[in-house]
Image (cartoon, rainbow, N blue to C red):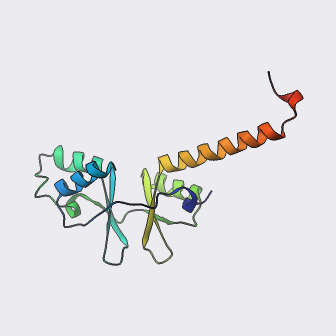
Amino acid sequence: MLVDQVCVREVDLATATESVQLAAQRMNDRNVGTLVIVDELHHPVGIITDRDVVVKVVARGRDAFRSTVGEIMTPGPQTVTGDSTVEDALIAMTAGPFRRVLVTNRSGKLVGLLSLDDILRGLADDFARIRTLLRRETPASLVER
């Protein structure tokens, strides 16, 4: 299975200079837990999660209106290309450890986001297709009743 087959193409973005409060509001409004920070050329330079907001701002009593995304983002996020295998993406995630990796094209521009949940959904779909094939190809005499 290739990353392109299971990654999410609509990725919510943030800028490094915007306030954490604004980023958190965007996460809430769009019902997402991750924002990607890109440069002018659309290359990913950082990632921020709802956990970052909680651990790096709320838990430390920082002012979310004055703190910027750039101050709390994880810089240099892990990336894979769309033609990478899901196995390669999992290796990249576990090396981190990360629950998600960014998907870029060959020139390094952001094209998607891949999470463990996306991989599990892809595997579940594959298993459902295999089950259907097995049911269709298995002789009736071998099927348990």
Residue at image location 16% in from the left, 60% down from the top: 19
Compared with 56, 43 (above or below) is: below
Side of 143 where 120 appears, left or right: left
Mark count: 0
Compared with 45, 143 (above or below) is: above
Q: Nearer the viewer, residue 93 or 138?
A: 138
Q: Nearer the viewer, residue 96 or 109?
A: 109
Counting from the top left corner in percent of width and height, residue 100 is at 43, 54
Counting from the top left corner in percent of width and height, residue 123 is at 60, 46
Residue at image location 12% in from the left, 50% down from the top: 62
Q: Which residue is at the far top? A: 145
Q: Quadrant of the C terminus?
A: top right
Q: Quadrant of residue 142?
A: top right
Q: Quadrant of the N terminus?
A: bottom right
Compared with 112, 27 (above or below) is: above
Q: Quadrant of residue 77?
A: bottom left
Side of 67 where 76 appears, left or right: right
Counting from the top left corner in percent of width and height, residue 55 is at 23, 46
Compared with 59, 89 (above or below) is: below
Residue at image location 19% in from the left, 57% down from the top: 22
Side of 78 where 122 appears, left or right: right
Residue at image location 25% in from the left, 67% down from the top: 15
Counting from the top left corner in percent of width and height, residue 116 is at 48, 48
